[in-house]
Image (cartoon, rainbow, N blue to C red):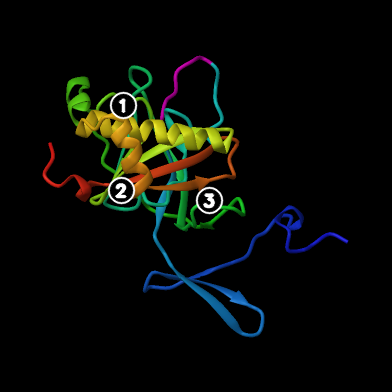
């Protein structure tokens, strides 16, 4: 008999949640109880027009952005995307009220949002001075740089996140590769962003405060 606790046997999982004015979510549990958790609204999908003439599905993320589902990119944060083509458009969506790292049941707390964004095109020289050689999405919060690795193979997504984190340390702070590896292993957090898209995501959180007044 199939084990009901095995995620492979869970099937489609969907339930209604409540959202309160104090930014808390709740899920009813049998016996009159409820699970409560904080809300942190964000857009799971932000991207720019990709290269190539073949139309692409907007779900799998890539160097152009897309459905990255990085829960840390909430209000007050920035996302840098390398422009792929002249006159590139910007697309966004997949709003969440809350999501756990991994989004293991395919959906999180999905809900409508009205988002206000500011889009800025950075000239190449300004982008290079601020971000180094940007070739894939890069997030920024007041506390962290958020480095992404994206690949169909989760192990390779992790490797890509490490490589990109080393690139950020070298370009932004002139940290040699061997020192960068040591620092990432000792002090940085690598998190599975999501495993539900065809392309999986891993992101690394690099604390800005660890570099003090470095320029």
Check disc 1 and report the residue beneath it: 134
Mark 3, Cα crowd under 10 Å, few <14 / some 14-19 / many 20+, is many
Of labels 1 and 3, earlier in sequence is 3
Mark-to-mark CA distance, 1 and 3: 25 Å
Q: Is residue 51 magenta?
A: yes
Q: Main secondary structure of the magenta part?
A: loop
Image vertical order of residue 82 relative to residue 37, above or below? above
- Residue 160's label in the rendered image is none
Picture coordinates of residue 17, whole percent (x, y): 55, 68
Picture coordinates of residue 41, whole percent (x, y): 40, 57
- Indicate the secondary structure of the residue bearing disc 2: loop
Is 195 in front, or is 97? 195
Of labels 1 and 2, earlier in sequence is 2
Residue 7 in view here: yes
Q: Residue furthest top?
A: 53
The magenta stretch spans which residues? 48-53
- Residue 116's label in the rendered image is 2
Is 136 in front, or is 81? 136
Of labels 3 and 2, earlier in sequence is 3
Q: Quadrant of residue 168?
A: top left
Query: Residue drawn 73% across and 63% down?
Result: 5
Check disc 3 and report the residue beneath it: 102
């Amino acid at each position: 008999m199939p084990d009901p606790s095995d995620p492979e046997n869970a099937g489609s999982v969907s339930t209604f949640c409540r959202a309160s004015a104090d930014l808390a979510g709740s899920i009813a549990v049998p016996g009159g109880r409820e699970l409560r958790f904080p809300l942190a609204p964000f857009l799971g999908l932000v991207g720019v027009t990709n290269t190539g003439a073949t139309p692409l599905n907007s779900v799998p993320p890539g160097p152009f952005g897309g459905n990255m589902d990085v829960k840390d990119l909430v209000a007050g944060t920035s996302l840098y995307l390398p422009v792929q083509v002249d006159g590139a458009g910007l697309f966004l969506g997949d709003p969440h009220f809350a999501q756990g790292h991994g989004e293991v049941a395919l959906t999180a707390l999905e809900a409508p949002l009205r988002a206000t964004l500011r889009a800025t095109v950075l000239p190449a020289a300004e982008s290079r001075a601020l971000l180094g050689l940007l070739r894939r999405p890069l997030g920024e919060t007041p506390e962290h740089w958020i480095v992404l690795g994206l690949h169909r193979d989760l192990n390779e997504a992790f490797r890509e996140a490490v490589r990109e984190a080393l690139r950020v340390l070298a370009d932004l702070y002139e940290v040699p590769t061997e020192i960068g590896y040591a620092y990432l292993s000792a002090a940085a957090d690598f998190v599975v962003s999501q495993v539900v898209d065809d392309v999986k995501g891993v992101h690394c959180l690099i604390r800005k405060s660890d570099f003090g007044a470095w320029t």
